[in-house]
Structures are given as C-alpha cells and as structure tokens.
Amino acid sequence: NYIKNKGELKLKLAYKTKHGKAFIGDSLELLKNLEPNSVNLVITSPPFALLRKKEYGNKNGEAYIEWLTQFAQAIKPILTEDGSFVIDMGGAYQKGKPVRSLYNYKVLIKFCDELGYNLAEEFFWYNSSKLPSPIEWVNKRKIRAKDSVDTVWWFSKSAFPKADVKKVLVPYSDRMKKLLKSKKHFYDPALRPSGHDISSGFNKDNGGAIPSNLLQIPNSDSNSNYLRFARKLHIKVHPARFPSKLPEFFIKYLTDPGDTVVDIFGGSNTTGMVAENLQRNWISCDLEQQYVAASVLRFTDEIEEGKAYYDSIMHDKAVDIISLF
C-alpha cells in the first residue's frame, strides 16, 4: 500500500488504475502518511496567489507563502535522496497597482534558505495561448504586456537528483539537420572564447538537441476525452488545467518506469494520466470531490463508462479502472 496504517485518514480513495490512485481530501494528510524516502518526484501546480478569488480556492500575500510552505515541509521527508519537487507558479500583480508581486521568488528563497531544498534549475513555461491579463493593466489601460510565462522551480533534496536529459531531447534545428545530412564541417574545430570546445565530432547525430529551460507549450488540450466527455455529460471541469506536455517533460526527465510520482493539487489529474501512460506509479490528491470525479474521464474511451465511474465517485464509491495505456 502507498499509505501507512496510522489510524483513520481524512482521505477517500476515488479510483485506482494499474499504476495509480486518486484521492479526495487534504494532501497534507496524504503526505504525512506516505513512507519516508518513497517518492521520486512530486510535481504540482498549486492554486496561484491571485488577488481575484477563484472557485477552486486561492490565498494571496504572506498567507499564501506560509500556506504553501507547510506542504513543501511535508514533501521533503517522503522524497528519495535523489528525488525532486517541481512546482509551477504563475505570476501576479500587487493589489491596485501595476507592480509585480514577488511571491513566487519569496517561495523560492524560503524553500531553499529555511527548508533546505536545492534549486536544481529554474524553468520558464511560455504559454502562447494564454489570454491577455491582467485586464486592468493590459486590456484597458494598455500599460503592461501580456503575462504569458510561469516560473517552474525544480527543487531537489540533494545536489545530485536523478536526471537524464537524453530522455527529453528536442528536434534539431533545420541548420543542424543540414549539417548532419551533409557529413561536412561548416565550422572550424577550436576552443571558442565562451569556453566551449567545438571538436571535429560536433556534427554527430545524438538523436536530438538538448532542451532549454524555456518550455514553449500551448495550453490547448481541447480534444481530450476529458473535455469532450465532460461537455457532453454536462460535468463541470477544473478551470485551471496545465497541458499534459508540462508534467510529461519532467516525468521523463527526472524519473524511470516504476518510479513513484505524486501530485498534491491534482485538479483534473493530468499528472496521473501522463504517469500512467509512462508506466510510473502515481498518487493524486485534491480537496474537491467533483474535480476528482471528473478526472476519471481521462482514463476511459467510452462516454457511458466514464459517466458510470463519475456517478460512483460522486456517491462515495471508489472505482477500479482497467488501464487504457
């Protein structure tokens, strides 16, 4: 079992698949009852520290930082020594003025200075399909540019977390493809002023290029079963979903098949679906029963089956799903 027997938990199992389990309840209770050194990756996108209240719940200011810190504190013991904690954090403005909040950077400093995490690397997720915001400063007064980038902090328990960039190589540029195809040198092998030693083997095909820490992923999963089935069944979906390619990048990069991945703010359970597909064990947890119940639609290709699963979960009956993947 994923959870130790420590008496009654404030958690309900919603559904399980071949590789994972989705819970309804307080993620702090989940984290407190997971075995130490048992999780390879925690990846999540918490409710952002927005000034305007969202239906899925959010805090702001110093209260938000303290609230989020309690989760980070509970995550550290359950990570393996080479484990990672990846958190997607959207930007925000200060109340009433066109000045950026520093909350996401304060979170970064607090987690490292006070909780002892390492910042393995900072990533930036560019979402080209993000709508212009905030409305007051961007749309109405037109004094600020559209906010299209989230900060994604990759924290680690040790200085050398498990990671293999060869698993997340990206396609070569057209220029590099031409170089590889020609089998000729269009450059002079030499030590560059930057310190890079460009050798005669620079045009070797390694299967792809090393990715940058700018992740360009549009949030446009409009054709997924989750959204199509939910619309047809008139089921309310989670309003703040991240695209599958975001957790996919980090799950491939930082874990191996058979490792365990946890999402403590599961929402529509994109993380669980991706982990299932990649044959990682996973645990997802969210406070809202309706969102967890709707997320089951990600694991079925039949709308009637999905409706039956959803109805069972909404009536507090856990379901066992035969994996599609």
Image: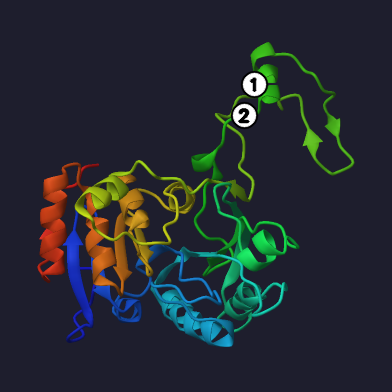
In what element is the residue under mark 1?
A: helix
User: Sequence order check: which comes first, mark 1 or mark 2?
Assistant: 2
Q: Please tell me in which quadrant of the rendered image residue 34 appears.
A: bottom left
Q: Position of residue 5 (x, y in %)?
A: 18, 81
Q: Position of residue 89 (x, y in %)?
A: 55, 66
Q: Does residue 274 sit above or below 3 in this rendering?
A: above
Which is more toward the observer, 81 or 140? 140
Q: Quadrant of the N terminus?
A: bottom left
Q: Is residue 20 visible in the rendered structure shown here?
A: no
Q: Please tell me in which quadrant of the rendered image residue 107 appears.
A: bottom right
Q: Which mark is residue 177?
A: 1
Please identify the residue farthest to the right as the structure is shown: 193
Which is more toward the observer, 288 or 117? 288
Q: Residue at x 80, y 19 (%)?
A: 186
Circle 1: is it few (<14), some (14-19), or many (20+) Cα within 10 Å? some
Which is more toward the observer, 86 or 132? 132
Q: Amino acid at mark 1?
A: Lys
Q: Does residue 288 sit above or below 7 in this rendering?
A: above
Q: Position of residue 80 (x, y in %)?
A: 42, 67
Determine whether, in the image, residue 114 is placed left or right of residue 4. right
Q: In whole angstroms, how far apart are the C-alphas of marks 1 and 2? A: 6 Å
Q: Does residue 212 sit above or below 116 in this rendering?
A: above
Q: Residue at x 58, y 86 (%)?
A: 62
Q: Position of residue 323 (x, y in %)?
A: 19, 47
Q: Amino acid at mark 2?
A: Tyr
Mark 2 lies on residue: 172
Circle 2: is it few (<14), some (14-19), or many (20+) Cα within 10 Å? some
Q: Quadrant of the C terminus?
A: top left
| Callout 1 touching callout 2 (CB < 8 Å) | yes
Please identify the residue farthest to the front as the structure is shown: 140
